[in-house]
Amino acid sequence: MTRETSNHDLVTRTGLVLHVRPVRVGDEKDLAEFFAHVTPQDLRFRFLASMKEVSHERLSDMTHVDHHQTEHFLAFDQDGQSIIATAMVACDVNLERAEVAISVRADDKHKGVAWELLRYVARYAEAKGVKVLESVENRENREAIELEREQGFIAVSHPEDPSLVLIRKKLS
């Protein structure tokens, strides 16, 4: 999946259609609006820190990615108007390991959005030649850990922080 061909439609288990594409520099305002509809707990899980809102600096970093080593996918609703989920994939310099972080709007949780987006990102990473896909989760984020386990990820204690879990999946 190259940047030019990475616009895709996904359908969740509940029939929800997601229009997925890479982030663009001009998406900062829409991304800020999206994060305003993510629960405080989910913001804490996503950024591994408590915050009331995502800063301009962080949003700028999230919209100014190189589309090679780092990719940030936005999933839009069926009309293509509102972001309902995001998935950031950050690869190491050799493109052998990648870390993924997914967020879903509060009112779109439990509809299969994170499940489909994680599958999509895993296929994307595998197509780039990534051998291991990882996620760092707060131990309290049981829903994410369970979802990742259902997709073949293995959970191990984080070597540097006992409050975190390192979730890892070997890609073929």
Image (cartoon, helix red, strand yellow):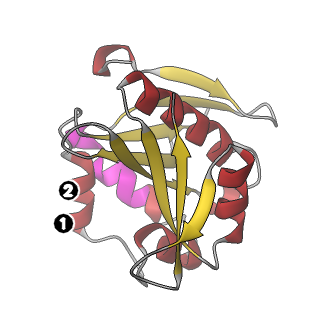
Could you tell me which quadrant the N terminus lies in?
Answer: top left
* Amino acid found under the numbered disc labelled 2: Ser
**Residue 49 at x, y percent in the picture:** 41, 81
Using the image, tell me which numbered label, if any, was put on residue 10.
none
> For the point 23% across and 41% down, which residue is it?
26
Report which residue position mark 2 lands on. 60
Mark pair 2, 1: CA separation? 5 Å
**Residue 30 at x, y percent in the picture:** 37, 49
Specify whether residue 54 is painted magenta.
no
**Residue 103 at x, y percent in the picture:** 52, 57
- Crowdedness near tag 1: few (<14), some (14–19) or many (≥20) residues, C-alpha within 10 Å: few
**Residue 28 at x, y percent in the picture:** 28, 51
Left or right, 137 with respect to 23, comes to right
Over which residues does the magenta segment extend? 24-33
**104 or 121: which is nearer to us?**
121
> For the point 66% across and 62% down, which residue is it?
145
Q: Secondary structure at mark 2?
A: helix
> For the point 80% across and 35% down, which residue is it?
13
**14 or 49: which is nearer to us?**
49
> For the point 18% across and 43% down, which residue is it?
93
Using the image, tell me which numbered label, if any, was put on residue 57.
1
Q: Is residue 56 visible?
A: yes
Specify whether residue 28 is painted magenta.
yes
- Crowdedness near tag 2: few (<14), some (14–19) or many (≥20) residues, C-alpha within 10 Å: some
| Mark 2 touches mark 1? (CB < 8 Å) | yes
Q: Is residue 79 visible?
A: no
Number of numbered discs on residues: 2
